[in-house]
Image: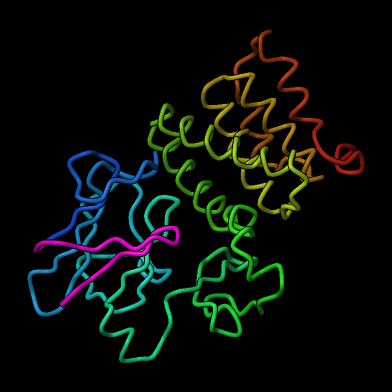
Amino acid sequence: MRYRLRFHLQEIDLIGDEVVVGRGSMGHVTIDDPMLSRRHIRIDLSEEEPTLEDLHSRNGTQLNGRPLVGRATLKDGDRIRIGTQELVFLIPNAVKKNHRTTSGLTFCTGCAVPYPSASPQCPHCGAVATEQGVSTSVRDVAASGWTFHLLSQVVDRAIGQGRLADAERMMSRGVSELEDQLEGGVEVEPSRILRVAECAARLGCALRSARWLEIGARLYGSADEAPSREVLALVDEVPADPRLADAMSALRHAGPETRQAG
């Protein structure tokens, strides 16, 4: 039986009894993503049915949108989400039997998950494909939907665990992607910008960093939203420091004037 992983429009043949996917060079499939552990997941191909397990990764694994617990049997078309990446497990023979094409992918503008172009709508969120939605060029525009959502979860967890260097590395990549989109005139939903703004503000408070506080303030302005009470409470807990005064003031007063007054 042949098995494959689809990753960014490429298909990788899985060879051997097991395949380890992760960030480190010791894995069979290496993906450069700071949210991945060095050995993140293992796909066992030694039995009649292929199985997937998380190798005690820091940020976990999702299978078809649900957290993976223990081992799970893999079926054709299963979606494996690790870090900011989504892999699709394929059984070529099963695809042929079901008469489904794998040659074309649509990147949904609603949830940014790829699905077969033959489908009239996204099977994950129900969005109907449009002329813009079926274009592969939309991928870079839409890719931040679930990526920013996942980023906020992972960064919050890293901050809570005191892994500030990891949190800063992940945020640097996420903010760079977001600001590239905004500068390029890409329309990004305010809720997505807000997620990143809140993470930047939290990180700024945890690191006592004027840079991250200023980034948070700037992104709140882009989202046209003021910081939440929870974020402002964190700012108030930061010890007085003249080096942070301007950045903290900018964050407190970020957003529309009507919200500032409140």
* Vertical position of residue 256 compared to residue 132: above or below: above
Q: Residue at x 42, y 60 (%)?
A: 86
Place of residue 167 in the rendered image (x, y in percent of width and height, measured from the top left):
46, 34
The answer to which of 202 and 75 lies nearer the viewer is 75
Place of residue 261 in the rendered image (x, y in percent of width and height, measured from the top left):
90, 38
Q: How is the image coloured?
A: rainbow
Q: Quadrant of the C terminus?
A: top right
Q: Residue at x 31, y 64 (%)?
A: 5
Left-right relation of 77 to 234: left
The answer to which of 229 and 122 lies nearer the viewer is 122
Q: How many marks?
A: 0
Q: Residue at x 51, y 68 (%)?
A: 114
Place of residue 33 in the rendered image (x, y in percent of width and height, measured from the top left):
39, 42
* Vertical position of residue 105 compared to residue 230: above or below: below
Q: Residue at x 38, y 36 (%)?
A: 161
Left-right relation of 195 to 184: left
The answer to which of 124 and 161 lies nearer the viewer is 124
Left-right relation of 219 to 70: right
Left-right relation of 96 to 191: left
Tell me if residue 7 is in the magenta stretch.
Answer: yes
Q: Which image quadrant for residue 181?
A: top right
* Vertical position of residue 251 compared to residue 150: above or below: above
Q: Which image quadrant for residue 255?
A: top right
Region in magenta: 1-17
Tell me if residue 79 is in the magenta stretch.
Answer: no
Q: Quadrant of the N terminus?
A: bottom left
Q: Which image quadrant for residue 216?
A: top right
The single residue placed furthest to the top in the displayed view is: 242
Place of residue 232 in the rendered image (x, y in percent of width and height, measured from the top left):
69, 34
